[in-house]
Image: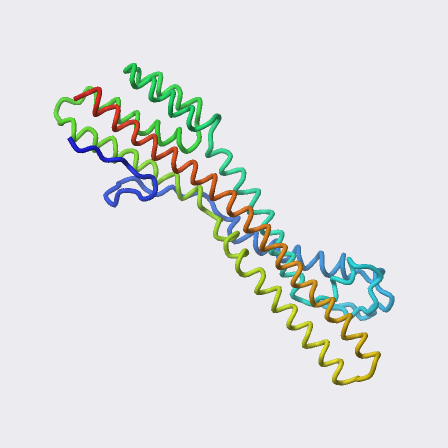
Amino acid sequence: MAETKPTATAASKSSSAPAKHGGNSISWIAPLVCVLAGYSIWRFMMGDASGFNEPDPAGGFWPHHMGPKDAFHRIYEGGIIVPLLIGMFLMVVVFSIERYLTIRRALGNGPIDDFVRKIQFQLASRNVDAALAECDKQKGSVGNVMKAGLRRYKEMINESGMSTDQKVIAIQKEVEEATALELPMLQKNLVFLSTITSVGTLIALLGTVLGMIRSFAALGEEGGGGAAADLAVGISEALYNTALGIGTSAIALILYNMFTTRIDSITHGIDESGFTLTQSFASLYK
């Protein structure tokens, strides 16, 4: 009998299980809130009038304060791109926390390798109920997939109208359907981290270029040594955009790789679970 290893990377096209849909309002609420928070930090903290020697009395959406007293308030002069970059950094924080909590739950209550070994031992002893109890203790994505497969496994033991091959295929299909419910929840919202990784630096460079344009425009209008000094200050302020963007992108990249590594370990555990069920049934219930 040919044995097929079920994979967790793609669900069966014939799967009848509906995809798991969770509330995902954070996907559109969080970016908006983060951008507004970024603007508030830039406008009311970095742009606080008390932090400048020559504050703009008119105020408004983008006050033109001059003479920042320290480096924190000097970031304000990086321009209107700065609040967007701050908002992107806040998005990294928010979605990292959300993914950490989700993946932590998906990992379950113990090492996945130990859990799979316990299931293998119980199945070798033909104790399916004990294996189901282990799934209840483990929980998480691997535990959920294994539990769904074990239920079908238990049904197939007493099924007399099917051949062994058909029973193994039925167990495999159940595992694939359960996998189709679990994997989308693990990968949801990672797109924000991957997008910020690549786009953050580009937006930062846009802010830098805009700052350089303003600086050289001022140099062309004024001329002289004083203008050269203003140019140097303007360039340093423009580079704050680059620093913020590169820092945000670097953090997003590190966190994205950490989360994908964790998801890969869960996916491997799901693969191993399905393989354990089909191999066990094929060898014990010929």
Q: Residue at x 71, y 81 (%)?
A: 217
Q: Quadrant of residue 158?
A: top left
Q: Residue furthest right?
A: 53
The quarter of the image holding the N terminus is: top left
Q: Nearer the viewer, residue 245 or 178?
A: 245
Residue 187's image quarter?
Answer: top left
Instruction: Tell me: residue 231, above or below residue 100.
Output: below
Looking at the image, is 122 positioned above or below residue 7?
above
Query: At which x and y percent is residue 274?
Result: 31, 32
Q: Nearer the viewer, residue 108 or 5?
A: 5
Q: Position of residue 160 (x, y in %)?
A: 14, 22
Q: Is residue 111 left or right of residue 208?
A: left
Residue at coordinates 51% horizontally, 34% vertically from top-left?
A: 104
Say if 61 sits above or below 247 in the image: below
Left or right side of 39 for 266: left
Q: Quadrant of residue 237?
A: bottom right
Give the colour scheme shown: rainbow
Q: In this rendering, is residue 233 above or below 50?
A: below
What's the residue at 79%, 84% (across, down)?
Answer: 223
Name the residue: 45% across, 40% down.
263
Residue 286 placement (x, y as % from top left)? 16, 22
Numbered-mark total: 0
Q: Position of residue 206 (x, y in %)?
A: 61, 69
